[in-house]
Structures are given as structure tokens and as C-alpha cells.
Amino acid sequence: MNHNPQSSDGKHDDDSALSDFLASLMDYTPTIPDELVEHYLSKSGFQSPDVRLIRLVAVATQKFVAEVASDALMHCKARQAAVVKDKRDKQQKDKRLILTMDDLSKSLREYGVNVKHQEYFADSPSTGIDPASREE
Amino acid sequence: MKDGGLENKNELENSKKQSKPYKFYRKSDNFALAIAKVAVAQVCESVGFQSFQHSALETLSDVTARYICTLGKTSNFNANLAGRLESNVFDIIQGLEELESGLGFVGASDVNRCLAHSGVVKDIVHFVGDAADVPFAYDVSRFPVVKERKGMGSFWEKGEEPHGEHIPCWLPAFPDPETYAAQSTARNETMSVSNGVKTGLVRIERKIERPLLNFQQQFARNGNEGGSSPVGGDSGKAREASNSNPYLAAPLHFGEKDVDVSPVILPTKLSNEVASRDPVPENRFVGNQVSVLETFAPAIEAIKSGICEYGSGKKNVLCSQRPTVRFKIGIGKKSLNTTPNFISKNKDLEKIENDNQKDERKRSRIF
């Protein structure tokens, strides 16, 4: 029981940190609009009069999307680096970073979302390969 | 952000054509998905992407929508588990921890952890600190817009007395008597007129339509304004309705409005026959069909007599019994033994042709 006052002080700090953070959320405008978040939350049964909670969900969702997108970007850059190693003269053309299904499925895989395309038979060997390398 | 990833111009055009008649993928929240697509595209741009594939963007926005729904569902569940209806911040944090548990967060293994200083929240705090403040590109109003509907008032609200003691006053009031009184009187009238069951039914339907339409008009009006309109005449309401909305106007009875815009000039023979046959308006259409058959009857008989006499007796009997025009002019052998029934489906044609050929062969064998 002795360390209770200390831990309770610690808890108060954390609580205040949390409430401060929630208050600061109202200053930050997330990219995902509040109306969209509210629509989906009300669709799923979420009920709350507190606007800060909706902001919290919006910020959390934005963080999730940003993480997935940055992982996909890493995959895209890794692939471009591998291509550039083979042909140095293609460096100028491959500057454009495109979000492709391939990269997206790889990054979503780590988050437990399976968006793998079904394998299929194609007419020619060049069907469905990366558009950047197709320009050759 | 530009949208790339399509190899040829042809593919681009095809995808544009295909995107419109995409009947199998119509979701009910298309508007919300469209907004989600814009938001996700903005986030991707802030991360560093310059363009995207359509399918990739759609997938990611769909996943985002599901993420929000899952968060809402989980936090609602946690709140209900704690005996509350409204969620609070700890329910959301628990939901976030559940979603992040796949990848892991700081302090996930700690059994006695407190939700207030959860690793998930700290990650979000870091993210908010680092990320640039990019607001959404468009102004979004609250959606879905809920239309306020004022239902029909109760007995108590209207100030009316319910018809019997068994009806409590807080129930919705009965509709005005005009809406259902006309139905019972119409029934009495049509029973006395013996013009065939079909025409009687047509008349009953017309009489029922009118009061039902009045009732619907009143209901629609009540839905818009609230409260019932004062008791007035049917014709008055109909006129009022037709002035405000042409689609709510009462349907016209046959002969009410003279329409002289038809470019078709009836031949004198047909019009005379119609006048002589039936003065009743409902039978006019039937009368027309019978007279057309009669005008072509000599032509049919000429064709029949020129080819074969087999079964012509049958055909004549059929002609006199059936009032509707079923008309088929055959050419050569194919019209053998065919009744003047217009066959629209090819299958039936083939069937009858086969039957005819079989009959021919049978006859050839016999003779």
C-alpha cells in the first residue's frame, strides 16, 4: 500500500496526459473527415456524445492508412532499386511512384488483410507485369 | 495526384466504359466510399506516392472503411460488456489494442497494463506530432440526411373521438371517410350490371383506385406537412393535387379527356363495326381485334383452300370461338395445317413444323 500514492500520482499524470492529448486533438485536423468517421461509426453501433472520441478514431485510422501506404512505398522503392541495378539508364523513367495492387497486397498481408489475386493463365508472357518495365 | 498504371489508351477507354454498367458491385454507401477514396488518396500523397492504380485505391479505401467499422463495433461491444450504452475513450483504446495486436505495440505483453498509458496511444501521439496537418480536400456536410417525417396524428392530437371504447386515443386516427366510402357504393352498382365478369372487375378496380389514390395523396401530404387536411370534396383534393404535382393527379377515366392527336386514321369499315358492336367503352379494344380478323378472313381462306383441305374445318371453328387475333401467314408447305395463331417463339414454330412434316410423311405412307 505504500507505493500506492506514488502510483496513483503516476496514474493521474497519465490520465492528464490522455485528456491533454484528447484536447489537443481538437486543434489537429485529420485528413479523414469527421463526417465520414461518424457515418461508419454510427453504422457499426458506436454511440458517444463526445466529439473528441471521433477525432481519436479518425486519427487512428489515418495512422493505419499511413503505415500501410509507407510499407507499400518501401516495397515499391525496393523493386525500383532492384530494377535500376540492372539497367542504370532507366533511372529517369522510374521516378514515378505508383501504388500498385502488388505492393499493397504485400503490405496489407502484414496487417492480416489478405488481398491476394488469384493466379490465372494468360495468352502471352508479358500480360500483367509491372507497367514501368512494360515500356521497354 | 495523377492516376497512372494503365498501359494503353485502349485499356483506359475500356475501363471508363466498364465502370458505368458495373451492376454487380453496387454498394449502398457509395457516397461514403467516394469520400473515403479521396481521403485515402490524400494520405497516400502525404506519404510520398505520386499516382495509384484504381483497383489499389478502391481496395485501400474499402479496408479503411472496414477498419473504422471494426473499431466502432469493438468499442461498442466493450461498452456493452461494461454495462454502458455509450462508449468512452477506454473502449476505443481497447479496440485499438485488439487491432494492433497482430503487429504488436509497446507493452503488449504486460498483463497489468493500464489503458491510460497504453502503447497504442503513445504511437498515436507520436504520429500526430510528426504528421503534417493536411485537411480534407472538400467540404463534407453531415450525411446521411434524415428526412423528418411527421406521421398521421393520433386521435388525441387531432382532437377526434375514437369510434368505440375499445380504441385508445393514442393510436393513429382513422383516415377520412371519403377515402373508403366510395369503394362500398361502387361494388353495389357493378353487381347489378351484367356485362361479363371481366368488365365488372375492371370497373371495381377503377372505383377502388380512385379512393386509394385519394388516400395516398392525403398520406403523402400528411407526411410533408403534418396533421390531416380538413374534410373536403374528392374533386377538390384531386384538383389541388393536380395543381401541385401532376403525378399525384387522379387517373383519367376513358372518355373524360378528348385526345385528337392520334395520326392513325381508322378505316371506315372498322369504325362502323365498332359502333355497331358494343357501345360500352371497355369492350372497344376487343371489338377492334375481332373486326381486324374478319377483314383478313377472306385472305386466310384463299391461302388455305389453295394448299390443303385437311384441318380447315378445325380452323374455322377456332376462328369463330376465339376473339383475339392470332395471325400467321405461312409460305408454302410450312403453313400446312397451321391454325391462324401468331407464334412468337421459334421453338413453337419448329415444333409445329416438325409435326406438319410428320403428318405429311404419314399421309404419304398411307396413300
Image (cartoon, rainbow, N blue to C red):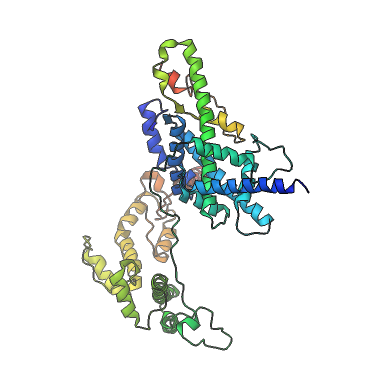
Residue A85 locus on image (x, y percent): 49, 12
Residue drawn 43% across the image and 33% down it: B45
Residue drawn 40% across the image and 25% down it: B7
Q: Is residue A128 left or right of residue B115?
A: left
Residue B195 locus on image (x, y percent): 40, 78
Quarter of the rendering occupied by the N terminus of chain B: top left
A116 and B104: which is toward the camera = B104
Q: Is residue A102 above or below residue B147?
A: above
Farthest residue to the right: give it: A1
Residue drawn 32% across the image and 54% down it: B302
Q: Is residue B279 visible?
A: no
Residue B260 locus on image (x, y percent): 21, 66
Q: Is residue B141 left or right of residue A117?
A: left
Q: Is residue A78 above or below residue B181?
A: above
Q: How many marks?
A: 0
Q: Is residue A80 left or right of residue B119?
A: left
Classify residue B5 by image quadrant.
top left
B260 and B82: which is toward the camera = B82
B90 and A80: which is toward the camera = B90
Q: Is residue B155 above or below residue A96?
A: below
Q: Is residue B234 visible?
A: yes
Classify residue A71 by image quadrant.
top right
Residue B68 locus on image (x, y percent): 55, 46
